[in-house]
Image: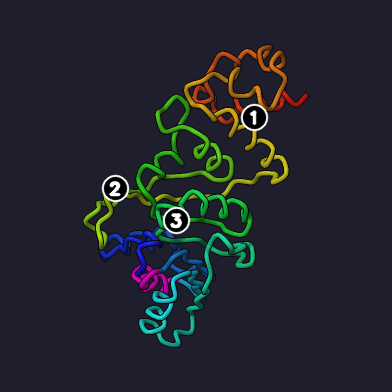
């Protein structure tokens, strides 16, 4: 596979089986969408658990390998596309799964959250650092924009870690499997709120007084009791409350 895609293939059968069980805990899902199936290691474990499996793959070499591995499988549909160009709402309702390429895991998550309402569960294998940031609590080293983005749209749970030796070739970092269960959020409101959050975390070591000056008049920001705090010190509910006051 061309290294430009940055893929590391999970080869541990017990871990693959454990991921599949997390994707379909009740034993059978009507529709699973797998992002980046590669050679089909996870695909093989998912097929018995679904009536339909849509595998989204960008690499023509891997698409050919999937065709050879699962010739004319009645439940498998391979979609040749870059996941960042795919509107996942077209596959609703579904469950999402995948071993996400580490270098584009954050943009993929943004696409996943834009399709909120299309999926009822998502189980992803990602870099451990990314999983920790997604699930981080306020006042922790990992809490930041990705934490708020994730937790605004879903309830994340880090299920288990995966060592480098479980992959071929082994990555230089540890990995983890994370479960996301969607929350309800107004998309139009969330867009503005996330612009505010992005500004609040723009320079993590600076206070909100400094970071929010690009969005709101400085006297208005300074009048808020949180102005001397850093964004990482505020929970999502506290950030929402501050945002509402600044807009009023």
Residue found at x 60% / y 17%: 209
Choose top left, top right, bottom left or bottom right for residue 68: bottom left
Q: Quadrant of the C terminus?
A: top right
Circles 3 and 1: CB atoms closer than 8 Å:
no
Circles 1 and 2: CB atoms closer than 8 Å:
no
What range of the chain is rendered magenta? 38-49
- Going from N to C along the chain, the mark reached first, 3 or 1, is 3
Q: Position of residue 237 (x, y in %)?
A: 60, 29
Dot 3: element: strand
Query: In the figure, 203 relative to 81: above or below?
Result: above
Residue found at x 41% / y 33%: 142
Nearer the observer, disc 1 or disc 2? 2
Q: Is residue 25 visible?
A: no
Nearer the observer, disc 3 or disc 2? 2
**How packed is label 1: few (under 14 Cα within 10 Å), some, or many (20 or more)?**
some
Residue found at x 49% / y 56%: 122
Residue matched to label 3: 123
Q: CA distance from mark 3 to mark 2?
A: 17 Å
**How packed is label 3: few (under 14 Cα within 10 Å), some, or many (20 or more)?**
many
Q: Quadrant of the N terminus?
A: bottom left
Residue matched to label 2: 174
Query: In the figure, 158 relative to 84: above or below?
Result: above
Q: CA distance from mark 3 to mark 1?
A: 27 Å
């Amino acid at each position: 596979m061309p290294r430009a895609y940055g893929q590391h293939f999970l080869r541990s059968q017990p871990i693959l089986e454990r991921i599949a069980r997390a994707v379909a805990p009740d034993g059978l899902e009507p529709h699973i969408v797998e992002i980046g199936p590669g050679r089909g290691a996870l695909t093989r474990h998912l097929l018995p658990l679904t009536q339909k499996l849509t595998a989204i793959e960008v690499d023509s070499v891997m698409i050919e390998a999937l065709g050879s591995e699962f010739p004319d499988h009645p439940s498998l549909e391979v979609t040749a596309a870059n996941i960042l160009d795919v509107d996942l709402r077209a596959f609703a309702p579904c469950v999402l799964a995948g071993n996400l390429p580490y270098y584009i895991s954050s943009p993929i998550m943004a696409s996943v959250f834009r399709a909120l309402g299309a999926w009822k569960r998502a189980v992803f294998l990602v870099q451990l650092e990314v999983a920790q940031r997604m699930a981080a609590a306020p006042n922790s080293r990992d809490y930041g924009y990705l934490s708020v983005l994730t937790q605004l749209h879903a309830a994340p749970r880090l299920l288990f870690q995966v060592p480098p030796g479980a992959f071929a070739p082994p990555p230089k970092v540890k990995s983890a499997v994370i479960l996301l269960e969607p929350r309800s959020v107004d998309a139009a409101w969330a867009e503005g709120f996330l612009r505010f959050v992005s500004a609040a975390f723009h320079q993590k070591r600076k206070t909100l007084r400094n970071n929010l000056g690009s969005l709101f008049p400085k006297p208005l920001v300074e009048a808020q009791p949180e102005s001397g705090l850093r964004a990482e010190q505020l929970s999502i509910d506290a950030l929402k409350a501050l945002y509402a006051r600044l807009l009023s």
